[in-house]
C-alpha cells in the first residue's frame, strides 16, 4: 500500500512516498523555483520513476495533501471533492500565501489521477478542540462571527504526531493512562509554537489567527504589544505592506541579531557576540513563559516534548528554556540532554516530577497515516 504525500508551496513542491505496510518512507524530493504546479507534478512523476520506487500513479492507494488553513470547517482530514476544494478556496483570505498554492497542487494531482482517493490534512485541525475561552480574542465578538477572527493555531500535524508518540512511550514505559495524560509540546523550528494537550486533544496553542503570534521565531516577532504597528505607522509613516514585512520577515531572531538560523546564532554567541546571546535568551524566555502558562492551563503536566529542528537538535536551547523551573517539577539532566540516543530521548533529572522528551517530528508520515486511515474507513 503506497501513499504519496504532497506539500505544494507557492514556488516549491515537496513530496514523500510511503510504504504504509512498513510505515517506511521509500523516496522523497524537493522541487524548488517551480513555475507552475502542472510542471512540478510532471517532474515529480519522472523523479518517482527514476527512483525505481513507483512507475505510475496507478500504483498508489491515495495521495495526502498538506493544507495550511482549514478554518472552522475542518476538524479532521477529509476526502477531497469539489465541495472540499470550494471550502479551501473560501478560506484563502485567512491564509493568502498558502491555501492558493495547496489548492493548485490538489487540482493538478486530481487531473493526473482522477480515480485516486485524495485527502486533505490541515495544519489547523488538531487545534479545533481548543475551547472558546482560549480561542476568542478580546475584540468585538462580531469580528469572530462575521470575519472569522479567532485563534486557529498551526503545526497541528506535528503536535499531534509527537503527542501520540509521547503517549505511546509513557504508557509503555510508565504505565500511564493514555486518556489522562497532560502534555506540553514545543515545536521549535524556523516557525515555533507550543501546544497544551489534554487526553490527546489540543486545549491551547501559541500561534493565533496567523502563525505570527506566540513565541519569538526565526523572522517573526511573536507576541508584541498590538499598538506597536500604530506607533510605527504614525511616527515612521510605515504602510500596511511594510509592517507586514517587518513583523513576519525582518523580526524575531533575525531582527534582534541579524541572523535567523539558530545553529549560526549559537556559534556567534559562543564567540562572544552579545546580540546573539540576547537572541538566545529571549527565545528561551519565551518558551519558559509558555511552559508556565500551559502548566496553569493544564493544572500540572506529565510530559514536555521538544521537537522541530531546534527542539530536536539543540541541547543548549532545551537546557536554557527549562532552567530554574525545579520548583515546578521540571529539571533537565545535563548529561542525558547532551547524549544523543535512540529515536525518543528522555532527558529529565531523576529527581524531577515532569518527564521531558525529545521526539523527532514526522509531519509527512502523520499525513500518510491519516490519509491511509481515512481511505480504509471508506472501503
Ligand atoms: P522549518 O520550520 O523550516 O521546518 P526546521 O524544523 O528544520 O525548520 O528547523 C530549522 C532550525 O533548526 C534552524 O534555525 C536551524 O539552525 C535549527 N537547527 C538545526 N540543527 C541545529 C543544531 N544542531 N543546533 C541548533 N539549532 C539547530
Image (cartoon, grey):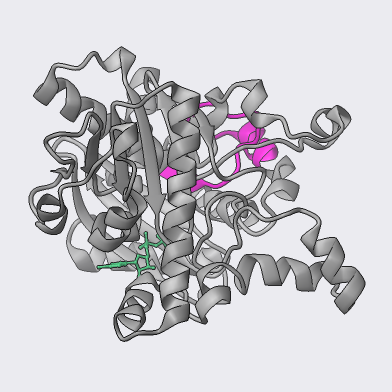
Report the residue at 88% width, 29% height from top. Answer: 142
**Viewed as shown, does residue 180 lie left or right of 137?**
left
The quadrant the N terminus occupies is: top left
Residue 116 image position (x, y, % from top left): 41, 38
**Residue 87 falls inside the magenta stretch:** yes
The one of 120 and 193 positioned closer to us in this rendering: 193
Of residues 158 and 151, the one drawn nearer to the viewer in this rendering? 151
Asked if residue 194 can be seen in this view, the reply is yes
Residue 361, percent from left and from top: 30, 47
Where residue 292 appears, x then y in whole percent?
45, 37
Is 66 or 215 nearer to us in this picture?
215
Q: Is residue 130 above or below residue 271?
A: above
Looking at the image, residue 2 sits to the left or right of residue 292; the answer is left
Q: Which stretch did the figure color magenta?
A: 61-88
Task: Give me the residue at 53% from left, 61% from top.
Answer: 9
> Which quarter of the rendering shows the C terminus?
top left
Amino acid at each position: 500500500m503506497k501513499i504519496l504525500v504532497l506539500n505544494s508551496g507557492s514556488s516549491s513542491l515537496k513530496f514523500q512516498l510511503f510504504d504504509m505496510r512498513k510505515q517506511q518512507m521509500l523516496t522523497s524530493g524537493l522541487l524548488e523555483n517551480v513555475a507552475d504546479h502542472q510542471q512540478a507534478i510532471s517532474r515529480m512523476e519522472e523523479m518517482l520513476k527514476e527512483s525505481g520506487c513507483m512507475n505510475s500513479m496507478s500504483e498508489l492507494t491515495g495521495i495526502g495533501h498538506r493544507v495550511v488553513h482549514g478554518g472552522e470547517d475542518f476538524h479532521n482530514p477529509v476526502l477531497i471533492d469539489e465541495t472540499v476544494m470550494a471550502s479551501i478556496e473560501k478560506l484563502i483570505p485567512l491564509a493568502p500565501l498558502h491555501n492558493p498554492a495547496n489548492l493548485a497542487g490538489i487540482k493538478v494531482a486530481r487531473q493526473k489521477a482522477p480515480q485516486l482517493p485524495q485527502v486533505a490534512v490541515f495544519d489547523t485541525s488538531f487545534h479545533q478542540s481548543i475551547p472558546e475561552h482560549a480561542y476568542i480574542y478580546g475584540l468585538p465578538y462580531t469580528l469572530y462571527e462575521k470575519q472569522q477572527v479567532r485563534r486557529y493555531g498551526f503545526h497541528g500535524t506535528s503536535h499531534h504526531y509527537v503527542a501520540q508518540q509521547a503517549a505511546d512511550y509513557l504508557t509503555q514505559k510508565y504505565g500511564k493512562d493514555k486518556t489522562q495524560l497532560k502534555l506540553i509540546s514545543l515545536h521549535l523550528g524556523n516557525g515555533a509554537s507550543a501546544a497544551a494537550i489534554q487526553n490527546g486533544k489540543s486545549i491551547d496553542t501559541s500561534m493565533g489567527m496567523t502563525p505570527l503570534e506566540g513565541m519569538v521565531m526565526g523572522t517573526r516577532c511573536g507576541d508584541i504589544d498590538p499598538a506597536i504597528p500604530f506607533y510605527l505607522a504614525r511616527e515612521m509613516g510605515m504602510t500596511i505592506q511594510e509592517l507586514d514585512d517587518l513583523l513576519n520577515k525582518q523580526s524575531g531572531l533575525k531582527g534582534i541579531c541579524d541572523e535567523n538560523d539558530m545553529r549560526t546564532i549559537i556559534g556567534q554567541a559562543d564567540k562572544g557576540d552579545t546580540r546573539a546571546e540576547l537572541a538566545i535568551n529571549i527565545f528561551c524566555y519565551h518558551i519558559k513563559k509558555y511552559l508556565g502558562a500551559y502548566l496553569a492551563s493544564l493544572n500540572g503536566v506529565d510530559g514536555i516534548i521538544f521537537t522541530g529542528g531546534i527542539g530536536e537538535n539543540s541541547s543548549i536551547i532545551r537546557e536554557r528554556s527549562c532552567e530554574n523551573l525545579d520548583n515546578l517539577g521540571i529539571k533537565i539532566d545535563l548529561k542525558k540532554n547532551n547524549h544523543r540516543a535512540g529515536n525518543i530521548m528522555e532527558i529529565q533529572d531523576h529527581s524531577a516530577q515532569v518527564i521531558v522528551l525529545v521526539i523527532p517530528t514526522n509531519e509527512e508520515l502523520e499525513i500518510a497515516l491519516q490519509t491511509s486511515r481515512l481511505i480504509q474507513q471508506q472501503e
